[in-house]
Amino acid sequence: MEKIKLGISSCLMGEKVRYDGGHRLDPFLKETLGQYMEYVPVCPEVECGLPIPRESMHLEGNPESPRLVTSFTKREITKQMIKWAKKRVIELEKEDLCGFIFKSNSPSSSMERVRVYNEQGMPIKKGVGMFARILMEHFPLLPVEDEVRLHDPQLRENFIERIFSLKRWRETLSKKESRGNLVDFHTRHKLLILSHSPKHYQRMGNLIAHAKDLPLKELYLRYQTLLMESLRLKTTPKKNANVLQHMMGYFKQELSPDEKKEVLEVIDHYRQGYIPLIVPITLIKHYARKYDQPYLKQQVYLNPHPLELQLRNHV
Ligand code: SF4
């Protein structure tokens, strides 16, 4: 797979663009995840024309449509930022981004919980960074996260799984549109979707079953929306355990009673939080190969992202 294009707040890449001339390098994002990504760095404050260093700024007023104001001289930057941001998101359409990683706690770049000050100077943490809001409104299905949330192993796995899935989806889009290509993508992603949302799994199954009733464009659009919606929902040990048991059904007849007992025990230990997901996955993969189950072997669920990222190694 070629590298995945991902937008990112420039300071997280180590660029010295912050108001104080510093950066906020995130080594995991740059070095580890960076092996698989082609980053497109964006610094809203510098790109909209502000210098380095500069006065710090914050949001004021209504959290839904706040003003961006410098902290001491109270200079308003709102119009300048909005004008630039609206142009920048149109430029970003050409980049074919599969996601965006924002810097937390920034009045320009954060995706949530930014302080917005009321008239009395009291902050409430309900704001969205001015550029982040415009970007998320422009690309509503794009996977987005911030670097602090990505320290949470579950959120990290979910985000990375979504960007790899979106990349595979874009590869399907780059081929000729056809019901066959869509069915092929869906078949490979079925169990991944099931691990996120049994409801979406059913709805997408129905959509595919009635694929002939819809014009291709509409079919692809509906599928894409359901796909990104489903993957946004978190997997849980219970949902994963259901998928693993479902997979075991494919080679149940071939297993000895003792092997069957072992698989069920491993799945249950995972469900109870004693062992990480990678353990039952490895066992199921082993049997899928041993008993040559083509449907299971092609499931993206068994390999949704590079093993080296160790995203399924936590309990
Ligand atoms: S948080 Fe955003 S605006 Fe601030 S320095 Fe980083 S990229 Fe630039």
Image (tube, rainbow, N blue to C red):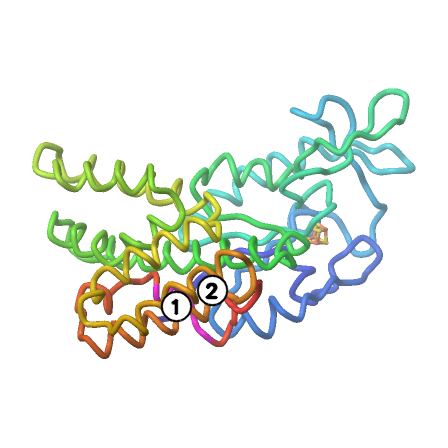
Task: Report x, y in % for residue 280.
Answer: 41, 68
Task: Determine the secondary structure under disc 1.
Answer: helix
Query: Which residue extends farthest left?
Result: 212
User: Label 1 vs label 2: CA separation?
Assistant: 6 Å
Q: Which residues are magenta?
A: 302-307
Q: Residue at x 60, y 74 (%)?
A: 31
Query: Which residue position holds label 1?
Result: 281
For the stretch drawn in magenta, the main secondary structure is loop
Q: The N terminus appears in which quarter of the rendering?
A: bottom left
Please provide percent x and percent y for residue 26.
68, 66
Circles 1 and 2: CB distance less than 8 Å?
Answer: yes
Q: Is residue 293 magenta?
A: no
Q: What kind of residue is marked 2?
A: Leu
Q: Nearer the viewer, residue 161 or 302?
A: 302
Q: Residue furthest front?
A: 257
From the viewer's perspective, tell me whether residue 223 is left or right of residue 142. Answer: left
Classed neighbour count for the residue bearing mark 1: other residues with Cα under 10 Å, few (<14), some (14–19), many (≥20): some
Q: Nearer the viewer, residue 63 or 179?
A: 179
